[in-house]
Amino acid sequence: MLKTLRSYLFWTYERGSFHYDVMVTLILLFLFVSPHFINYHDRPLYQLPSQIMVENDGAGALIYQVKKTDVDQSLTHVNGSTEDLRTQRALRRLIEPIAGDVLIDRYEPLRTDDGNISAYRVWAHR
């Protein structure tokens, strides 16, 4: 038994033998099954928005200011039942590459003098 384990450890079996196939199968199982049980904290990199400003609100939360054009571009990749939910998911998707996994407490649109939305202020925390 010890000899077999040592041979596995030092990979001494010939290609095409039963033990070689077992080792390759175990490696492939680890590669394809382990991401379902182990969180490697890897996420796809999204294109970062043009500009996000961050402020501290003094109570442990951060305030992010996101341009409306960035939110509009991100809305095409987000689905939801209501416009409010879609906007919140798009904002979270834009903020997460910068801040990590966050929870959005609330958000409000910032309007220009003529009433159009120019940006969103988002209150979020980890």
Image (tube, rainbow, N blue to C red):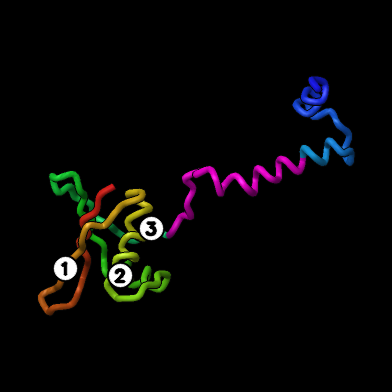
Looking at the rendered structure, the kind of residue marked 1 is Leu
Please identify the quarter of the rendering in which residue 95 is found: bottom left
Q: Is 122 positioned to the left or the right of 77 in the image?
A: left
Looking at the rendered structure, the kind of residue marked 3 is Leu
> Residue under circle 1?
110
The residue at the far front in this view is 1
Of the pair 124 and 38, the residue shown nearer to us: 38
Looking at the rendered structure, the kind of residue marked 2 is Leu
Look at the image and give the residue range highlighted in magenta. 24-46
Could you tell me how far apart the alpha carbons at marks 1 and 3 are, in whole angstroms?
A: 21 Å
The residue at the far top in this view is 2
Of the pair 78 and 82, the residue shown nearer to us: 82
Dominant secondary structure (helix, strand or loop) of the stretch shown in magenta: helix
> Residue under circle 2?
85
> Residue under circle 3?
48
2 or 1: mark nearer the eye: 2
The structure residue drawn at horizontal position 24% and vertical position 53%, both measured from the top left corner, is 124
Q: Which of marks 2 and 3 is nearer the N terminus?
A: 3
Determine whether 40 is above or below 104 in the image. Answer: above
- Name the spot of residue 21 as percent of width and height, x first: 82, 41
Determine whether 62 is above or below 106 in the image. Answer: above
Please identify the quarter of the rendering in which residue 49 is found: bottom left
Q: Name the image quarter holding the N terminus.
A: top right
- Name the spot of residue 120 as percent of width and height, x first: 22, 65
Label 2: state its secondary structure: helix
